Amino acid sequence: MSIHIGAQKGDVAETILLPGDPLRAKWIAETFFENPVCFNNVRGMLGYTGMYQGKRVSVMGTGMGVPSISIYAHELITQFGVKNLIRVGSAGSYQEHIKIRDVVLAMAASSNSGINTLRFGGADYAPTASFELFQKAVDAAKNKNIAIKAGNVFTSDEFYTDDFESYKKWSKFGVLCVEMETAGLYTVAAKHNVNALTICTISDSLVTGEKTTSKERETTFKDMINIALELA
């Protein structure tokens, strides 16, 4: 048992899916797992372990933002032996060609978060995905005929920004979409020499203004889950 996760040694599988929303974690466990068992409800951050096609796999919510996912990733790795951390989250499109419900693999994460600036004394650090998981995700998507986009994403500390047009600068430099956790996840995973990958579904577009509902984001983004579970 760690400070924020009320599990015992062995309760968590080596591969874990990490949605931000704990209710999405519950939905994933109940929809895709055989015999899911809840291993955590501390702070309402639901976590489950079950079987998927004969493989043991876990899922747990992380909350929103770099600090939150960094805490949970650190404890999952150092206290419970997790080796593969796969974020399955929603993102906002920065590009006209990336539409609602498109699936994006985050090869790397730009960010306005100050955590790595603090960690590296003002120097830039480039958080990147595990090549092993990335390659497996590409292969899984091909096998399942799921179209994907891949590239740089933007991890933001702000959800409600004062400058709505600021996304255009990142868009101009090829950033695909915005979310709030990947830079933190990739950094923690690199520090501890384990694998991490973010798979996002586009929930809204800053270009067109289209949006999905909170219920849709919780229960209908199945393509990214199907890819993520193949990595187990």
Image (cartoon, rainbow, N blue to C red):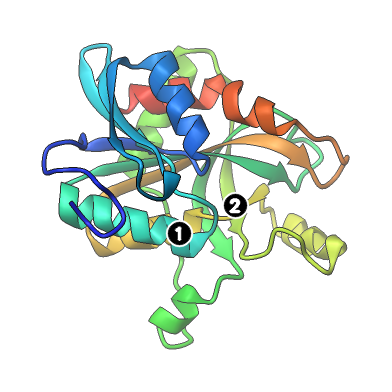
In the visual, does 97 lie left or right of 175?
Answer: right
Q: Which residue is mark 2?
A: 153
Residue 102 seen anywhere in this rendered image of the structure? no
Camera-side mark, 1 or 2: 1
Q: Nearer the viewer, residue 66 or 172?
A: 66
Q: Which residue is mark 1?
A: 68
In the visual, does 91 lie left or right of 132?
Answer: right
Residue 101 numbered mark, or none: none
**Residue furthest toward the bottom?**
121
Q: In which image quadrant can residue 39 be found?
A: top left
In x, y percent, where is residue 223?
Answer: 54, 21
Q: Earlier in the sequence, mark 1 or mark 2?
A: 1
In x, y percent, where is residue 24?
Answer: 51, 31
Q: In the picture shown, does residue 185 fall above or below 213?
A: below
Q: Secondary structure at mark 1?
A: helix
Disc 2 crowd, CA 10 A, few/some/many (<14, 14-19, 20+): many
Instruction: Please name the residue shown 50% across and 50% down the image.
Output: 63
In the visual, does 103 lie left or right of 25?
Answer: right
Alpha carbon distance from label 1 to label 2: 18 Å
